C-alpha cells in the first residue's frame, strides 16, 4: 500500500519556472515538497538580480496568456504586481527596424528588388525540389536551405546562425530548426501562395512565429516577481525552498530502480534529503554525473556529449530616460544579439531619469565576453553607439550576469546521446528530468510551468497508487 499523502516526500532539483510550478502543484495537494536551488533567489534563468538600486533580468522573460489555467493562477498569485504589456519586439535588418516576427511587407521593403527576386526564386526552387524529390536534411544548414532556399539561407541565416552559436550551421542538428528557429511569417506568405498553385510544402517544419498582437505580463521589479510569488505560495502551503543549495549526489537503489535520497551542499555543510519522488530540472548531464551509483560508462560518455551555450548578460544603468523604441530588439551583426529595455514594460528605475538595458550575448566560459574584458566591453559599447542606443559616456553602471548552461546546444549528432540519457532516467521509476535544462528543450515561461505541472501530476499519480 502507498504511504498516506501527508507522509510522502518529493525532492525538486532546480527552482526555475518548471521546478517551482511543479512544487506549486504538489504543495497544493498536501505533499511535503522540497526545492533545492543553487541560485540566491528563485527563478533560475527567468528571474532578476538586484544590483545597487535596480533590478536586472537574466534575459527577456514575460508571461504569455496562451495557457489559460496557468495564466489565471499567476494573476491570482501576483495580484496588482502584474503589469499587462503589449508585445513590441523588433528586428534590426536590412538597415531598418521591422516588427518581429518579420512580416511579408517588411521583407519586400527590406530587400533590394533584385535580391528579393533572387531569394523568392530560390524559395520557389526549394519547394519544387521538396515536392518532387523529398529528402531528409542531415544538418541545420540543409534544413534551412530546404525551408527557405539557398539564396535566402545565404542572405539571412548563415552568418547570424554561425555567429550566434559559435559553430557553422553544418555542425548543428536539423532538430535545432524544428525546435528553436522561428518560422519567418514572410516566408509563410510565399509558401501559401505556392500552395494555391499546387506546390505543397513537404519540407522540414520550423517553429511557429510569435503573434504580432499579444499581451504579455511583467512587473515593476522585473522578472523576479513571478517566481517570487510562486515560491511564496509553495512555502505558504507547507513546502520548503532552499536557495544556494548545490545538489551533489542523487542516490538511487539499483535493485529497486528508485531514487532514495538527494545530497546537497548548503551553508558550508552537506545535507541529505530522503524522497519518494524526484523531479529534476537541472541540466541533464549534471544530473547523470551526480548519480550514485553512477550510470554505465556508455551513458556517462553520452552525458559528456550534451552541451549548452553559455550566456553573459550585460546589465547597464544608462543616464537616459529611454534608449530604444520597444520592449526588445534583435540584432544580426553586432557583439550582442538582443537588447531589451524593461523600463518600457514598467520596470521602476532609479534614478527616474535613468533607464536599464539588458544586453544579451552568447559566449564561451572564460572568453572575453564571459570575463567582460575591457576589449569585450569596448566592442559592446561601440556597437551600442553605432546603433544610436546610447553613448558609452551615458553608461553609469555595468553589471555582468552569467549562465554556464544558458541555451541547449543542438550540435550535430546529439540526439542518440540525449536518448541514452533519457533511457537511463526512465529506468529509475520515481525520477523525472524536465524543463529547459533538464529536458534539453526550449519552452517559454508558460510551457515550462506546464511541464512542471505535468511532472507533478505524474508523481502524484504514482504516490497515490495502491
Image: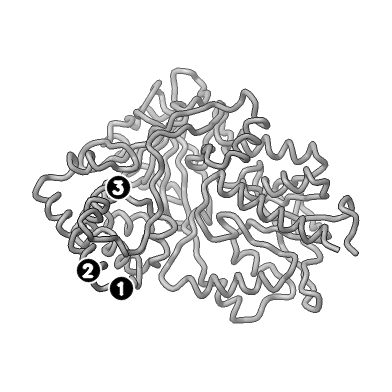
Left or right: 453 as drawn, with respect to 93: right
Category of crowding for the residue at label 1, using alpha-carbon neighbours closer than 10 angstroms: few (below 14), some (14–19), many (at least 20): some
Q: Where's residue 291, x and y in %? A: 70, 70
Q: On residue 332, which mark appears? A: 3
Q: Which of 1 and 302 is in front in this view?
A: 1
Left or right: 281 as drawn, with respect to 412: right
Q: On residue 135, which mark appears? A: 1
Q: Is disc 3 placed on a helix, strand or loop? A: loop
Q: Which residue: 42% across, 67% down?
A: 411
Query: Contact, CB < 8 Å: mark 2 with mark 1?
Result: yes
Q: Which residue: 27% across, 51% down?
A: 192
Q: Mark 2 points at which residue?
A: 129
Mark closer to the chain start, 2 or 1: 2
Q: On residue 389, which mark appears? A: none
Observer able to see residue 314: yes
Q: Which residue: 9% across, 49% down?
A: 114
Q: Where's residue 436, x and y in %? A: 55, 55
Q: Where's residue 288, x and y in %? A: 64, 69
Q: Which of 189 and 463 is in front in this view?
A: 189
Left or right: 452 as drawn, with respect to 170: right
Q: Which residue: 79% across, 58% down?
A: 270
Q: Distance between the residues labelled 2 and 1?
A: 9 Å
Q: Is residue 371 above or below residue 247?
A: above
Query: Contact, CB < 8 Å: mark 3 with mark 2?
Result: no
Amino acid at each position: 500500500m502507498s504511504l498516506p499523502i501527508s507522509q510522502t516526500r518529493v525532492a525538486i532539483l532546480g527552482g526555475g519556472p518548471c521546478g517551482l510550478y511543479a512544487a506549486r502543484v504538489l504543495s497544493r495537494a498536501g505533499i511535503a515538497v522540497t526545492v533545492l536551488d543553487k541560485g540566491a533567489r528563485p527563478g533560475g534563468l527567468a528571474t532578476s538580480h538586484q544590483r545597487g538600486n535596480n533590478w536586472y533580468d537574466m534575459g527577456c522573460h514575460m508571461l504569455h496568456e496562451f495557457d489559460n489555467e496557468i495564466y489565471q493562477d499567476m494573476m491570482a498569485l501576483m495580484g496588482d504586481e502584474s503589469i499587462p504589456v503589449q508585445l513590441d519586439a523588433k528586428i534590426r535588418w536590412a538597415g531598418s527596424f521591422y516588427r518581429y516576427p518579420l512580416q511579408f511587407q517588411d521583407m519586400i521593403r527590406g530587400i533590394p528588388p533584385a535580391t528579393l527576386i533572387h531569394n523568392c526564386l530560390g524559395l520557389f526552387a526549394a519547394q519544387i525540389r521538396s515536392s518532387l524529390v523529398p529528402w531528409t536534411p542531415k544538418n541545420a544548414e540543409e534544413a534551412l536551405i530546404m525551408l527557405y532556399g539557398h539564396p535566402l539561407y545565404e542572405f539571412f541565416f548563415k552568418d547570424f546562425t554561425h555567429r550566434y552559436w559559435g559553430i557553422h550551421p553544418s555542425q548543428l542538428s536539423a532538430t535545432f530548426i524544428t525546435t528553436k528557429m522561428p518560422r519567418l511569417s514572410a516566408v509563410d506568405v510565399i509558401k501559401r501562395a505556392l500552395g494555391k498553385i499546387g506546390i505543397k510544402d513537404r519540407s522540414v517544419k520550423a517553429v511557429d512565429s510569435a503573434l504580432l498582437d499579444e499581451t504579455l505580463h511583467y512587473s515593476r521589479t522585473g522578472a523576479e516577481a513571478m517566481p517570487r510569488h510562486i515560491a511564496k505560495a509553495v512555502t505558504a502551503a507547507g513546502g520548503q525552498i532552499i536557495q544556494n543549495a548545490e545538489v551533489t549526489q542523487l542516490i538511487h537503489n539499483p535493485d529497486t530502480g528508485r531514487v532514495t535520497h538527494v545530497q546537497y551542499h548548503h551553508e558550508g555543510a552537506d545535507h541529505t534529503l530522503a524522497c519518494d519522488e524526484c523531479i529534476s530540472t537541472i541540466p541533464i548531464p549534471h544530473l547523470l554525473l551526480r548519480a550514485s551509483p553512477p550510470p554505465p560508462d556508455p551513458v556517462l560518455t553520452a552525458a559528456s556529449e550534451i552541451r549548452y551555450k553559455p550566456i553573459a548578460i550585460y546589465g547597464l544603468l544608462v543616464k537616459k530616460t529611454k534608449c530604444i523604441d520597444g520592449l526588445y530588439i534583435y540584432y544580426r551583426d553586432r557583439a550582442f544579439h538582443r537588447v531589451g529595455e524593461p523600463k518600457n514594460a514598467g520596470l521602476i528605475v532609479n534614478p527616474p531619469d535613468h533607464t536599464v538595458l539588458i544586453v544579451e550575448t552568447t559566449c564561451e566560459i572564460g572568453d572575453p565576453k564571459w570575463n567582460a574584458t575591457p576589449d569585450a566591453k569596448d566592442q559592446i559599447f561601440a556597437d551600442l553607439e553605432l546603433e544610436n542606443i546610447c553613448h558609452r559616456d551615458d553608461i553609469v553602471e555595468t553589471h555582468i550576469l552569467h549562465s554556464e548552461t544558458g541555451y541547449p546546444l543542438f550540435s550535430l549528432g546529439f540526439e542518440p546521446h540525449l536518448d541514452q540519457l533519457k533511457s537511463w532516467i526512465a529506468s529509475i521509476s520515481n525520477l523525472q528530468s524536465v524543463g529547459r535544462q533538464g529536458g534539453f528543450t526550449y519552452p517559454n515561461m508558460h510551457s515550462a510551468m506546464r511541464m512542471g505541472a505535468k511532472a507533478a501530476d505524474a508523481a502524484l499519480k504514482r504516490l497515490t497508487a495502491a
